[in-house]
Image (spheres, helix red, strand yellow):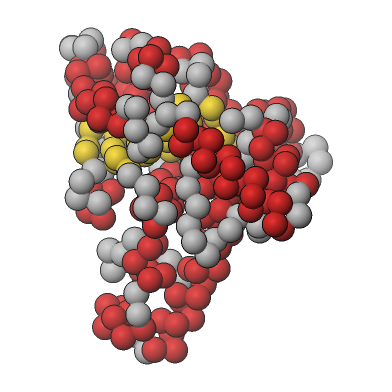
Amino acid sequence: MTDKTTLAIQSASRAGKKATVTAHIEAMKATGSVVVYTLGPKGGIGKSLTGRLVIDGLQAANRTVRIAQVDRAPTLPLLYPEAITIEAPGAEEMRSDPLAAVRVFEPLEEMVLSIAKTDAVGVIDIGAGQNQRAFLNFVARGKFDRFLTGLDIQPIALILITADPSSMAQSANLVEELQLVHPTAEIVPIVNLRDGRFNFLSGTPAHKIYMDRIVPLMKERRRVTLPSIAAGAWPLFEAAGMTFTEAVMANETALVEKLGMSRLMVTALQGDVSEFLAVVWPRLGAVTGFAVEGFDGSR
């Protein structure tokens, strides 16, 4: 799982790209299970969105998925009833009970054991702030890195990065901290273009942070660019409690009833979401191990 795969995909022909992605996914299946984390320095930068894209892509590809969310206000169980929730202890609780940050993660370890030696993929969405601090504490104190290695499970950490200067610096700090406590995890930067492209005027603080902190951490790493979805396309489906798979697979009549809009409007919105997935699913699938029919990784 090195950057060589990405370079091969970028330089190959359309047919070659599809073959390279397919071969990589099959190799991942053959080498054991995978656990995917979605992390980021603050809320609202696309962690759960990325997690949902991975979950829905895996399910659409008929892969077995185990889901967990580390958050005191979880949202994934509303969409995926099988998801387990881990509520990270607060700072005061951790001070009064030093083992609290380890004890609450016992269900996560049980989930990992359930997918060991299978082709299942675990997806763990980790909230920001105290949730993230508690998770990193657990990884370090619980020797989680060694535990996964012993089970032949490959950890992949998807780290969200947006064009906001403070967020970029915090994402870089997160990468450094994760490397210390979880050295075998493959860190994959997710460059989220939701807030715009990473084009900064030379000499500005944002440009300096980008060049000094972000460019080095992306060097020789696989990375995924997450384009912005068409304005207004996804919130309506999300408000209706739909997954990405449901949004693109539903027929027009069902969507008209569900969204309360005209056939013309729901058709246009469904097309916008489908175009977004046609770009995003192959990119994320090449990293996390899935390929959805009709989304061939050639974009």
- Residue at 25 percent of width and 19 percent of height: 101
When the figure is inspected, residue 258 is found, relative to residue 96, above or below; the finding is below
Q: Is residue 76 something that shows in the picture? A: yes
Q: In this view, does 164 lie above or below 239?
A: above
Of residues 275 and 90, the one nearer the viewer is 275
Residue 124: x and y, percent? Answer: 35, 36
Describe residue 270's horizontal placement relative to residue 59 as left or right. right
* Residue 67 placement: quadrant: top left
Q: In the image, is 41 to the left or to the right of 220? A: left
Percent coordinates x, y for residue 281 in the rendering: 52, 55
Q: Is residue 211 left or right of residue 57?
A: right
Q: Kindly identify the residue that appears in the image at 23 percent across and 43 percent down.
A: 83
Q: Which of 160 and 118 is in front in this view?
A: 118
Residue 180 drawn at (x, y percent): 51, 14
Question: Residue at (68%, 51%) from the top-left corner?
Answer: 17
State the quadrant of the C terminus.
Answer: bottom right
* Residue 193, visible in the rendered structure: no
State the residue lying farthest toward the right. 202
| Rendering coords of residue 202 (x, y %) | 81, 41
Quadrant location, the N terminus: top right
Q: How many marks?
A: 0
Q: Residue at x 41, y 46 (%)?
A: 51
Q: In this view, does 146 lie above or below 27?
A: above
